[in-house]
Image: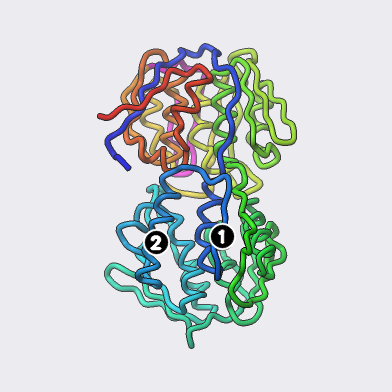
Amino acid sequence: MNMREQFIIKGLGGAKRLEGSIAVRGAKNGVLKALAATVLFDDEVPMTNVPDIEDVKRMRELLEALKVEPTVLKKDIAEKFRASIVLTGPVLARQGKVEFPFPGGCVLGERSIDLFLNGFRAMGASVEEGESYFTIRAEGGKLRGEHITFPLVSVTATETLMMAAVLAEGTTLLQNAALEPEIADLALYLNECGAQISGAGTPTITIVGGGLLHAGGISYNTPPDRIETGSFAILAALVGKDVTITNCNPAWVDVPLALLRQAGVDVEAGKDVIRIRAGDMPYQMVSVHTHEYPGFATDLQAPMAVFMSQCQGEGSILETIFDGRFRYVDDLALMGADIVVMSPHRVVVRGPKKLSRKNLESPDLRGGLAYILAAAVAEGTSTVDNAYLIDRGYEHIEERLAPLGLDIKREMT
């Protein structure tokens, strides 16, 4: 891990030159939860299609540290990525206690953990907040099943309490649960190993608690990353001549692909492949309304803003999930984009506008990838600093984009 690396991208000036195929790696938002779930097992869990990304390395470090202190999520590691919080459920369920700091990751406005704390309280645990750590204790060392209705849809809260309920006493009912496909994928695997989970992928999930799970050699195969899939599709629409995205699940990005088609992009989707060919420019403007799955993913919002900057007309992005997700806007405007923040939840984009080179610093994981897209479209050579943030979720991105024809390299600063 090195915080002093940057990407150097020679822009195509809007020319459509990228050609070839690029394979999607395993889902960051799938494998991190599966790694956390290994705490529920009495044996080793084989895994395939695991992406080589920084957040996976941090999760493995946390799991290694648990071998020394089985109830403590080490502060210096957990604070580096948001998904560390999903470990609290499995650790609390197995050990009867968990200590953890406020989780880290990208700064995207207020991200309350009350959904987790209130869920644990409902399952019979006590919550103590100290200066550096939260300490959660299950009454009698065992969580109990409960009927829990989430006031807000939350992917990580759904996953965390679903995993905690696997070892709880009795039956847990989770209502207003998140629908993300990674949740159903994880539940399917856990069921293969002895869990009793029904309804995953719907708003109501039922978990009948039991004993430790047993993999018995059954592998968890990480599903394709739908955010990476959507990001590559947007890149191909911007500067692609003929780009094929393989090892993906097009059904998981139906809404982004529909918007690209609406704009005039030539999109052809098969069972596990997407082909995007150069269309007439400029594309027609679209508007975006982020929403929980199956809606437009908030993680694709920043890349989509770059696409919209090259479209004809006026459109808007309405962000309904997070505050603080428009931190990338000022830099896109300095590159030449006509994009204005109207409120913490809405921006207006007018186009098309030519983008020019700029030295950029990644504001967060998804914003950093959007900067790479903007640099690819722009005229001249741009730099994107703080490569680590991009490495948190995208495996060796420069090595995978270069064969398509993008002039991108990594160097130390």
The dominant secondary structure in magenta is: strand
Q: Position of residue 23 (x, y in %)?
A: 59, 32
- Pick whichever, 19 or 347, lies toward us: 19
Range of magenta residues: 338-356
Query: From this viewpoint, which residue is outermost toward the left?
Result: 413
Here the colouring is rainbow
Query: From this viewpoint, which residue is outermost toward the bottom?
Result: 140
- The residue at the point 60 percent across, 41 percent down is 226
Which residue is tagged 2?
Answer: 64
- Looking at the image, can residue 176 be seen? no
- Pick whichever, 304 or 144, lies toward us: 144
Q: Is residue 287 above or below residue 100?
A: above
Does the magenta portion include 345? yes
Hey, what amino acid is under mark 2?
A: Glu
Of labels 1 and 2, earlier in sequence is 1
Q: Residues within 10 Å of mark 2 (few under 14, many from 20)?
A: few
- The residue at the point 27 percent across, 70 percent down is 131
Q: Is residue 11 above or below residue 257?
A: above
Q: Are marks 1 and 2 in contact (CB under 8 Å)?
A: no
Measure the C-alpha gap from mark 1 to mark 2: 14 Å
Screen quadrant of the C terminus: top left
Q: Which mark is residue 273?
A: none
- Per the image, label 1 sits on a secondary structure element best described as loop
Q: For this view, does 286 lie left or right of residue 359? A: right
- Per the image, label 2 sits on a secondary structure element best described as helix
Screen quadrant of the N terminus: top left
Residue 214 placement: quadrant: bottom right
Q: Residues within 10 Å of mark 1 (few under 14, many from 20)?
A: many
Q: Is residue 35 above or below residue 243?
A: below
Q: Is residue 89 above or below residue 342?
A: below
Which residue is tagged 1?
Answer: 45
Does the magenta portion include 168? no
